[in-house]
Amino acid sequence: MSLRPASGLLRSALRSHLVPVANWSAKPAKHNIGGGEQAIAMTVLFAAILGPSGWVLAHLEDYKKKA
């Protein structure tokens, strides 16, 4: 078995359609998203990512005492 470099593996994966290729379009969006909707989406995204990690970091000393 010969070892191919990572770029060769990526090239062969793209060629054999193991990795789906994104469909890019130069057309404008069908639905425009307003600033309010973007703000809500970003708030939910940040809360979903930073909320649990912030909880763990805030209670790190409690977790250390239990172990």
Image: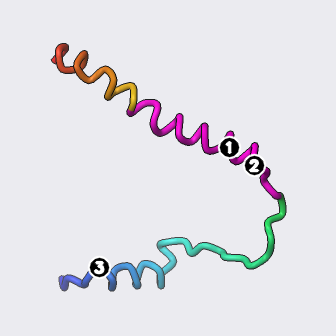
Q: Please report the residue visible at 52 percent of the width from the left and 36 percent of the height from the top.
A: 48
Mark 2 and mark 1 in contact? Answer it, CB < 8 Å: yes
The CA distance from mark 2 to mark 1 is 6 Å
Mark 1 — residue?
Answer: 39
The dot on residue 6 is 3
Percent coordinates x, y for residue 34 in the rendering = 79, 50
What residue appears at the point 29 percent right and 79 percent down from the top-left corner? Answer: 6
Could you tell me which secondary element the residue under label 2 belongs to?
helix
* Residue 45 image position (x, y, % from top left): 56, 42
Q: Position of residue 14 (x, y in %)?
A: 47, 80
The dot on residue 35 is: 2
Q: Residue at x 55, y 71 (%)?
A: 20
Residue span colored magenta: 32-53
Residue type at mark 1: give it: Ala
Q: Is residue 17 left or right of residue 53?
A: right
Horizontally, residue 33 falls left or right of residue 63, namely right
Give above or below for 60 relative to 28.
above
Which of labels 2 and 3 is toward the front? 2
Q: How is the image coloured?
A: rainbow
Residue type pointed to by label 3: Ala
State yes or no: residue 40 in magenta.
Answer: yes
- Spatial separation of the CA atoms under disc 3 and disc 1: 39 Å
Q: Quadrant of the N terminus?
A: bottom left
Distance from disc 2 to disc 3, alpha carbons, whole Å, reads: 41 Å
Going 45% across and 36% down the picture, which residue do you hit? 50
Q: Secondary structure at mark 1?
A: helix
Q: Position of residue 43 (x, y in %)?
A: 60, 38
Number of on-image labels: 3
User: Helix or strand or loop: what does disc 3 sit on?
Assistant: helix
- Is residue 21 located in the magenta-colored stretch of the structure? no
Residue 8, image quadrant = bottom left
